[in-house]
Structures are given as structure tokens and as C-alpha cells.
Image (cartoon, helix red, strand yellow):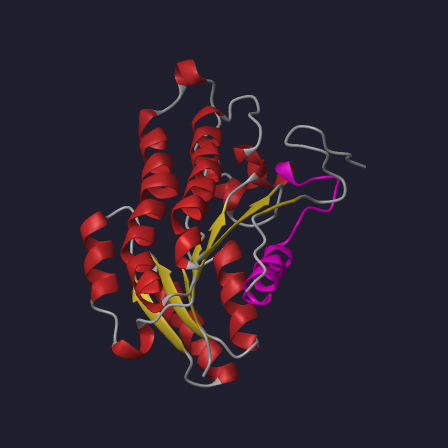
Amino acid sequence: MPKLILITGATSGFGEAIARRFAADGWHVLLCGRRRDRLDALKRELEGLHGPMAHAVHLDVRDRGEVERTIAALPAEWAAIDVLVNNAGLASGLDPIQTGDVDDWERMIDTNVKGLLYVTRAVVPGMVARGRGHIINIGSTAGKEVYPKGNVYCATKHAVDALTKAMRIDLVEQGIKVTQVAPGAAETEFSEVRFHGDAARAKQVYAGFRPLSAEDVAGIVHYAATLPPHVCINDVVVTATAQANSTVIARR
């Protein structure tokens, strides 16, 4: 019986790459995201390549009621989730704390922290009832250290780091695996979103070195999810070879 993976933020970046990686390996893939057109297009693509093994759910993780209703209403064949990938997340703005945009702060906190919690709370009771499951939280090197003007984004990813550890403690007696994958600089839509659509500024973030790709991160998530039942990777910090930490990058 194919395993089932739920991926939040599946319409771009890491989420989209994770969906493709697992679908290619024969998993049933439950795609969740805000952009319905992209969701439907990815579902059609995966079904065209691998058969009827993808299901798309329009979902904004920031909306607690919507999360609860959507997860509760999943068809029976899509309800027994083996792996939850809490991928939905973003950075919005890059300003010092004294001039930061409070709307940016709210957006990051609501998505990166509260959204992760809402989805986890809706999905994990089913894992506990079945006595198996795996939660994979997509963190960041920003959850391991703080960099200039990163303030609230770094705080939300530190929260992901702490919540991952706390989940592991709470769920260890239930046999539920909990993993964090914390990437460094990866060339996705991340910086364009951070800079509110300024593609030229976003491109400069990745100039002069080879950053991670979404596919690199998807491969690590797949590896962590396919280890034997008694093996759990707790935490993976991954950067490009050229990146020593959040602020030290060898550019050519």
C-alpha cells in the first residue's frame, strides 16, 4: 500500500519539489496551498506522470478554522497521513526592528508559527491513534542564529526549532518521528517574497555562488522519511558549500 504524505506550501519552492520527489517514488501526495491554479496544475502534472495518486486541497494555514475543517473533511483514502511536511513559511521584509512593518511581522508569525501549529494539531491525533507517523518541519539556519535585520523572521524559525524539539519529547512514547530540516540559502521564491516582489533585489542574494536548490532539500526530506522505522533523524542543517553561516558566503 503506498504511503501518504501531506505537504503544506506545495505550490512552489521546497514544497513543490518535495511533492515531485515523493510522487516519483510512488507515494500518494496530498498537496496543500493557497494558490488554487498552481495546486491544480501540479496535481495534473503528477497524475500525468505517475497516475491518480495526488490530491489537491486549497488551504491557508493561517486560518485555524479552515485548517480544522479541511483536515476533518479529507476523504477516507486521504486521511491516514503517514508523513506531514510543515513546509509553508516565508520571510517578509528585511528591516531593523525599529522600522519594521508590523504587517510583515504578523504575516510571518501567522504562517511560520501558528500555521505550523494549526496543521500539526489537526493531523497528529490521527497518527497517534494509528501508532505511527512522521512530522518533518522545514526550519532554517535562521532558527539556529540571528542575523542583521532578520529579527522577527529569525524569531519564528527559532520557534520552529524549539517546537520540533518539544514535539519529539511529547510524541516519543507514541512512536511518532519528528525531524527538522534547516536549509541555508536556497534559490526559490523566498527572497522575492521577502522583498515584496522585487526580483532584481532578490537575484542579488544568490549572486556569485551556487546556492541550494529546492530539489536538494527535497532529497534530504525524502531520505529522512524513508529510513527504517527505528531510525529518526532529529535535525539536519544544510547549506551550500560556499556558505559558512547566514552572513558568511564565499562569492566569486
Q: Quadrant of residue 166?
A: top left
As rendered, which of 127 and 111 lies closer to the eye?
127
Q: Is residue 150 magenta?
A: no
Residue 42 in the image: above or below residue 105: below
Considering every residue shown, the one lying at the far top of the view is 98
The answer to whether residue 8 shows anywhere in this view is: no
Left or right of 76: which side holds 166? right
Residue 94: x %, y % from top left? 49, 27
At 31% from the left and 41% from the top, the residue drawn is: 114
As rendered, which of 225 and 71 lies closer to the eye?
225
At 23% from the left and 48% from the top, the residue drawn is: 63
Residue 68: x %, y % from top left? 21, 56
At 59% from the left and 67% from the top, the residue drawn is: 228
Q: Quadrant of residue 199?
A: top right
Left or right of 210: which side holds 90? left
As rendered, which of 126 and 48 lies closer to the eye?
126
Instruction: Write the start and end of the magenta stretch as one range.
Output: 205-229
Residue 214: x %, y % from top left? 59, 56
Left or right of 69: which side holds 56? right
The answer to whether residue 137 shows anywhere in this view is: yes
Residue 166 in the image: above or below residue 48: above
Can you say which quadrant of the picture contains the N terminus? Answer: bottom left
Residue 32 in the image: above or below residue 74: above
